[in-house]
Amino acid sequence: MHRDTELTELVRAAGSLLLCPRDSAASHHTAARIWGGIVPEDGFVHISTTGVRPKVQGIRAHRVKAGGQQCSRLGGVRVTTPVQTFLDLGSALGLVDLVVLGDSLVKAGEVTPEQLVEAATTFAGTGRRTVRRAAGLVRREVDSPMESRTRMLIVLAGLPEPTVNHKIRWPGGSVRFRFDLSYPDHQLIVEYDGRQHAESEKQWGGDIGRREWMDSKGWRIVIIRAKDIYNTPGQALQRISSAMRDKGMVVPQLSGEWRLHFPGLPGDVTELA
């Protein structure tokens, strides 16, 4: 290859497969990124093979049974299919990361939620319980992994699941505003704001106009940032629950399951379940 070739995930996989048995395929984290999925970075190229696993620095090889994986070719490289990749990662990812992967694969146009649910129903491999539950929680039109995490914090706390990407339209039918997560019947929005909302003048100006419109129509918005998810998820849930009550929603007793996936930092609120 030419020295100026961009070192993409697909190129790294192609190079790694030269050191592996012929029936090998890029899989797991590597396949996920090739298909446009979002997974945690672990520094390895992941390969699955039915033959002898190569012991090479930088390659993590997985042994599979002959005929045990569905594969396709992309740019001449053998890669596990998006659905197979989702199933395989059920043994490596937690529930929230697996939902993030599913949402991102759907956004990339590689799978549908229904395809994941169908495949998970008959999947008998390691992590099948996590796979089945995660598949049922994958949604369309999720714009970012942090939106997936925010939605999962809400759902795992036992709160009502919000609508994803609700649209407000102009009289002619074109989209005027989109809300990441919302409860349209109660005019309540839960929205993740990344740094681009503060650093982009265009984004900032658009946000101001949209929030002035929301104020004029009686909508309430709860802004969630990265620290709310990773550092103080309990406080974030308090704010969301309080906003729900203010808008007349019935707020159930919170489940404690959220703590298993969003532990937060010491000093986060403890009075939540």
Image: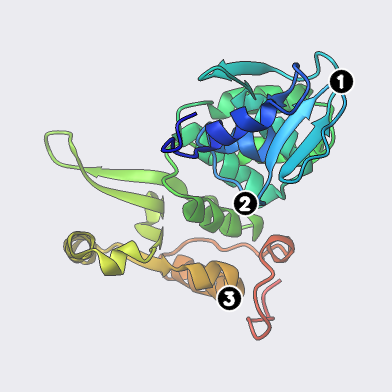
What residue type is disc 2 on? Pro
**Residue 232 got which mark?**
3
- In the picture, the disc for residue 65 is 1
Name the amino acid type tagged 1: Lys
Dot 3 alpha-carbon crowd within 10 angstroms: few under 14, some 14 to 19, many 20 or more: some
- Measured in 3D between alpha carbons, the distance from the residue under mark 2 to the one under mark 3, in whole angstroms, is 21 Å
Please state if 239 lies on the left or on the right of 58 as rendered. left
Say whether disc 2 or disc 3 marks the residue closer to the N-terminus: 2
Q: How crowded is the residue under tag 1: few (<14 C-alpha within 10 Å), some, or many (20+)?
A: few
Quadrant of the image for the C terminus?
Answer: bottom right
Q: Answer with the quarter of the image where residue 205 lies.
A: bottom left
Residue plotted at (65% across, 40% down): 29
User: Which residue matches tag 2?
Assistant: 40
For image coordinates 50% across by 28% down, the residue present is: 1
| Tag 3: amino acid | Thr
Nearer to us in this view, 17 or 226: 17
- Helix, strand or loop status at disc 1: loop
Mark earlier in primary sequence (1, 3): 1
Mark found first going from the N terminus, 1 or 2: 2
